[in-house]
Image (cartoon, helix red, strand yellow):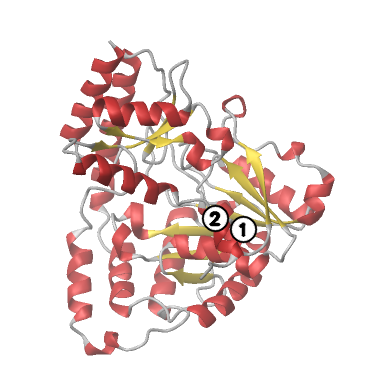
Amino acid sequence: MRAARRIEKLPPYLFAEIDRKVSEARSRGVDIISFGVGDPDLPSPPHVIEALQEAAADPVTHRYPSYIGMPEFRASIAGWYERRFGVTLDPDTEVQPLVGSKEGIFHLPVAFVDPGDVALIPDPGYPVYETGTILAHGEAVLMPLLPENSFKPDLDALSEEVLSKAKVLWLNYPSNPTAACVDKSYFDEVVAFCRSHDLLLAHDAAYTEITYDGYVAPSVLEAEGARDVAVEFHSLSKTYNMTGWRIGWVAGAPVAIEAIKRLKTNIDSGIFDAVQRAGIAAIDGPQDHLAECVDRYRHRRDLLCDGLKSMGVVVDPPKGSIYLWAPVPEGHTSESYTTFLLEECGIVVAPGTGYGPSGEGFIRFSLTLADDRLEEGVERLRRISS
């Protein structure tokens, strides 16, 4: 028996590999401190859990959900965009709920990329942008994100040959893994670029609500003309600590939303209505938890930055996301230093190359671990560097 060739083209998923290495180390009795996966350790808000419990007890929610999402949930998403970004969306034509934003990110190339078409992928970037393109039989062209360019792609470096075949351009700010941030003027420039080259701009906005030091992340849909050429993915995972709930959305250009809807009606049956009701409670309910979460992540960011600085590794404190993108010591590669940390002090980080070749020379720390474990991790790092 042989799997399809398209499966053979896929690399092992980075976080599945991290989980495997952690399990192996723990089986040997190693006390692991994991800075690897960006999975919030803080709980979902109580009122969201209560909404789920109440909805799950209602037999109405036990039947097939709507393929395109509950009208009330789509209206809540549109209302959030109005309040948060001043963007007015039609909940019927410009909003589509998703079984977590990863699902939509993976399926977007299926809806827009034909065999031989190009998708422009940030490098380093979330691996699913590329793997979705591979399974759509498209060509992933990597756009290097370099420190000297503030981890933004050099669009002028894209050749006319590549642009003539390109269908989709992916962005992600605040960024995973680099934690880079941009302002609205940058989105204005990229939207204009996509309009001039007939590209769909796909923005992964999972971290817009996790920002620090007065920075407020914009939505790409705020840019002039964006709703004609852009879609934006968002999720309740990081904003409301709901990674396990699998609920998110894509919003923006009606043509793109219609294509994604048509695809989804053929491959899934929608999100459990009780989870959608909980999503409404999250979006429309009290937001007190968010300031507390952001303050906790900021504290962890500062602890880790200070610890790395004491070891001679200077990292500018990022203004957004739940990650730190740090250079590896001289003489190490990303992979070798990741292995060294695991073997020498039981610390798990994500190698930069797991996000693309331009991630070489970096590792990613996640801030989603308890303060005491983070402090212990910093002490272990100090010990091996002394």
The single residue placed furthest to the front in the displayed view is 1
The disc label shown at residue 134, or none: 1
Q: Where residue 181 sits: x, y (%)? A: 50, 37
Q: Where residue 257 sits: x, y (%)? A: 58, 71
Amino acid type of the residue that numbered disc 1 sits on in the rendered structure = Ile
Question: What residue do we see at 63% from left, 70% from top?
Answer: 111
Mark 1 crowd level (few <14, some 14–19, many ≥20, 10 Å Cα): many
Q: Tell me which corner region of the image, top left, top right, bottom left or bottom right, holds residue 159.
A: top right
Badges 1 and 2: C-beta atoms under 8 Å apart?
yes
The disc label shown at residue 10, or none: 2
Q: Where residue 184 sits: x, y (%)? A: 57, 43
Amino acid type of the residue that numbered disc 2 sits on in the rendered structure = Leu
Q: Where residue 83 sits: x, y (%)? A: 43, 58
Q: Is residue 131 above or below residue 334?
A: below
Q: Tell me which corner region of the image, top left, top right, bottom left or bottom right, holds residue 30.
A: top left
Question: What residue do we see at 66% from left, 66% from top?
Answer: 112
| Residue 213 shows in this picture | yes
| Residue 252 shows in this picture | no
Mark nearer the viewer, 1 or 2: 2
